[in-house]
Structures are given as structure tokens and as C-alpha cells.
Amino acid sequence: MSYKVYLNKFRILRHEALVDLNTGCYNKAVSALWFSLEALLKALIIKEKKTPPEKSGKLIGLAIRYLFHDISDPAMLSRLLISLHYRRLEIDHRRRISDKEYAEKSLEIYNKAIVLIREKYPWISEI
């Protein structure tokens, strides 16, 4: 997929996550939050003329090493991304069922990650 396709996917999934959260579809919201960030990371990696890996752990590692090594707290961004990915795995592949509190905490993690990402890519706030 191209940079523009992933960027559009980021926008759509972010919107869907917020709609799901507001309508009580908490499991879907948690998943969509992760997949929104995953699409954004892939878009940014493609924009930098690299090929994004398929595996989430490798994607996070590459993004931190290559894109975000020079932000104020790359280790914090890494922890936030890993945390949100883990929360998605808990919902989609384990016995956990999300409630409002779990989904809202996931949104908080998502928003903190976006703040750090915007340090390097401030134009993201406009999309």
C-alpha cells in the first residue's frame, strides 16, 4: 500500500474508534485505536522511503529507531505503542472484554502517543 492509503486508513480508523467509544463498542474501539496508529507508523515509514514490516514489534522498533530517535522521549513513545498493542491483543486474542474504563485508558495512551509523534510531524494535528 502507498503512503496516502495508510494515511487515509489512519484517519478512518481513528474516527471509527471514537465513534465506537461513544456508542459503547469498547472492544472495537480498542482495536481500532491500535490499528489507526499502526497505519500511521506505516505511512510515515513509507514516506521516508522504507518498507514497513508486517509484525507489530518490528514496526514499533523500526519506527522508534528510524523515525523517532530524536524526539524528547523515544522510550516513552515505545512504551505507549507497546502498551496499546498489548491492550489490542488482550481484547482480540485473549479472554479480556473491554469496558468503558479500559477503552478510555486506551484512548488516553493513544493520545499521548500522538502528542509525541507530533513533535516530529506537527502536520498530523491537521488531519
Image (spheres, rainbow, N blue to C red):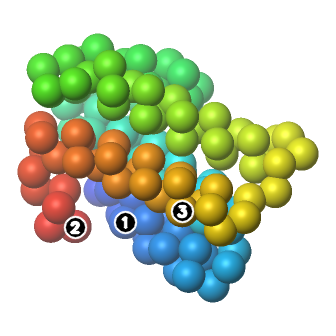
Whether tag 2 and tag 1 are in contact, CB under 8 A, the answer is yes
Q: Nearer the viewer, mark 1 or mark 3?
A: 3
Q: Label 3 is placed on what type of residue? A: Glu
Label 2 packing within 10 angstroms: few (<14), some (14-19), many (20+):
few
Look at mark 3 in the image and give the residue it sits on. Answer: 104
Q: Residue at x 41, y 18 (%)?
A: 61
Q: Determine whether the residue tagged by mark 2 lies in a helix, strand or loop.
A: loop
8 sits left or right of 73 in the view: right
- State the residue position of label 2: 127
Disc with the residue nearer the chain's start (1 vs 3): 1
Who is closer to the viewer here, 84 or 41? Answer: 84
Q: Residue at x 33, y 47 (%)?
A: 112
Q: Is residue 122 left or right of residue 49?
A: left
Between circles 3 and 2, the one closer to the viewer is: 3
How many angstroms separate mark 1 from mark 3 (CA)? 19 Å
Q: Quarter-wise, where is residue 65 in the image? A: top left
Q: Quadrant of the C terminus?
A: bottom left
What secondary structure is marked by label 1? helix
The disc, 2 or 1, on the residue closer to the chain's N-terminal end is 1
For residue 11, which numbered disc appears in the image? Answer: 1
Q: Amino acid at mark 2?
A: Ile
Asked if residue 118 can be seen in this view, the reply is: yes
Query: Please, what is the three-letter code of the amino acid marked with disc 1?
Result: Arg
Viewer-side residue, 14 vs 77: 77
Q: Is residue 92 left or right of residue 51?
A: right
Q: Position of residue 98 (x, y in %)?
A: 74, 59
Give yes or no for contact between labels 1 and 3 (Cβ–Cβ under 8 Å): no
> Where does the image place residue 71, in percent across and percent down from the top left?
14, 27
Query: Which residue, as the protein is rendered here, is positioned at the far front?
Result: 101
Please identify the quarter of the rendering in which residue 89 is found: top right
Tag 3's secondary structure? helix
